[in-house]
Image: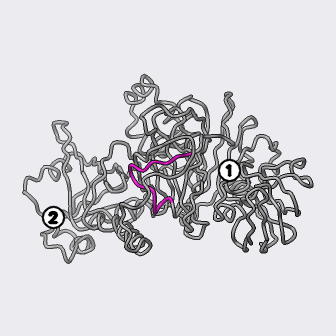
Amino acid sequence: MSRAYYDIVFTPAVRAMQTRMRSRATYAPLDYADDRRDALTADEAEFIHERDGFYQASVSESGWPYVQYRGGPAGFLKVLDGKTIGYADFRGNVQYISAGNLQGNDRIALMLMDYAQQRRLKILGRARLVDRSADPTLIARLGMPHYRASVERAVIINVEGYDWNCPQHITPRFTEAETTAAVAPLHEEIARLRERLGSTEASERPRALGNGPLALRISGMRQLTPRVRAYELRATDGSDLPPVTAGSHIDVPVRTKSGVTSTRRYSISSSPLRRDAYEIAVLREDASRGGSTAVHADYRLGMTLHCGLPGSDFPLHEDERPAVLIAGGIGITPIRAMVRKLCADGRRFELHYAVRSRAEAAYVDDLECRLGAALHLYAADRRHRLDLVRLMAQIAGDAVIYVCGPERLIDAARNAGRSAGIADDRIRFERFAAARIAAPDRAVTVTLKRSGKRFTVPPGQSILDAVEAAGVQTASGCRGGTCGTCRVQVLKGKPEHRDTALGAEERGPGRLMCICVSRAEGTALSLDL
């Protein structure tokens, strides 16, 4: 079953042009889509209801198209049922070009724009005109009682197909109400910063941060969702950046609530083919240890970050086997880089992206534009759930599977893969943190042998954070127990290992522990720091 919209617009001449320009393969899956898209759903109805205008095209008797803008109060274009939309035709300049065209040819096309979110909905249908006197009840249903305009007729459109268009080349524009809503979080953040900084002037905030070997300047910032912000990073001297691969990460400096400069690890979400800039996307988690909130509060355009060199613990395979990409929430960041690489190489893949809601789905418009039917979006608020058991049962026998997201998503994917008989080495994953330990934290007294410092680490604080708060610098990376960068030799005491980075030999008596997540089985530890 093909989609109705493409049955209409993909004429033989259009398909021939796509073949000549090598884009036919991108759209071929739409000839076999499950969703015909000839009946509007709740998503389209909501989008239509929020619009205060649209572009409308009709065709004259001479074959010329005629496009005009129809405007009115938000919601004046109404969804009457899944197959029918309509609007009250307000009196205008009395040229009646569209009305005349529709008398001879009832085909009509609408384009509804959301410039602020760079979204557009295209609708094809057949229209009929209903005079005001012919059906007063219908006119009353479509009318806008508080809008001072004279209604001459109703335009009723039978929907034959629709399509959501990609955001590419849509210049964002904002109404007064949208601008007010967009800047409201900034005003709130300014108020929080003023309270936090007290009488300290903004100019006294650091212009540079960190002591890593790679100096990067924040050259761009984008608000992807209400809680996710993207940062573009370029070399301060304008040179090419170190090469990266899809799935790479970088450690960036942050200033914690205690004033200590620490690091946090974020995936590089931009194309690995780029050498001029990296992009990271940071989800603000107010209940976390403060790294993401510090990034959102402190990072600004022009600021210099002395970062670590990029690395990779989540590489993409290089051969021609197909890839299945599974992302949950902010786990899309390394997956997006994989998408860019796979697209550039022309390799087979599909993406399954699970989110709480579309509004919280970072990069979703870009992915829809690039992938079309290869993107499968699961929004929990729409009751669209990712069925991993069903997915794993359908995956090709040679496909390599990549999973990034919350711990429960990764565990569920691995369990579903095992049930489907998929070998563990075909499911590759990147955790945000090591698997959780059921035992609660207890206070532990830590002695740093080389620096001569001794302190107590309370429940809820990591040993790494406490070491940094004591003014002792030590290497760190993921801060989630997955990379092993913060490994330290244990001189006395028995650690309770909570990481996934160290092997059995490294965990032996008097060996190593990852101080970002691990604790002590007793009440004291002595570390070689």
**Percent position (x, y) of residue 58?**
22, 46
Between 474 and 373, the one nearer to me in the picture: 474
**Percent position (x, y) of residue 99?**
16, 53
Please report contact status of discs 2 and 1: CB closer than 8 Å, yes or no. no
Q: How many marks?
A: 2
Give the secondary structure at mark 2: strand
Q: Image check: 510 left or right of 222?
A: right
Q: Mark 2 belongs to which amino acid?
A: Phe
Name the disc covering residue 90, or none: 2
Mark 1 highlights which residue? 475
| Span shown in magenta | 295-307
Give the secondary structure at mark 1: loop
Q: Image check: 2 left or right of 521?
A: left
> How many neighbours does mark 1 have within 10 angstroms: few (below 14), some (14-19), or many (20 or more)?
few
Q: Mark 1 belongs to which amino acid?
A: Ala
**Percent position (x, y) of residue 97?**
13, 49
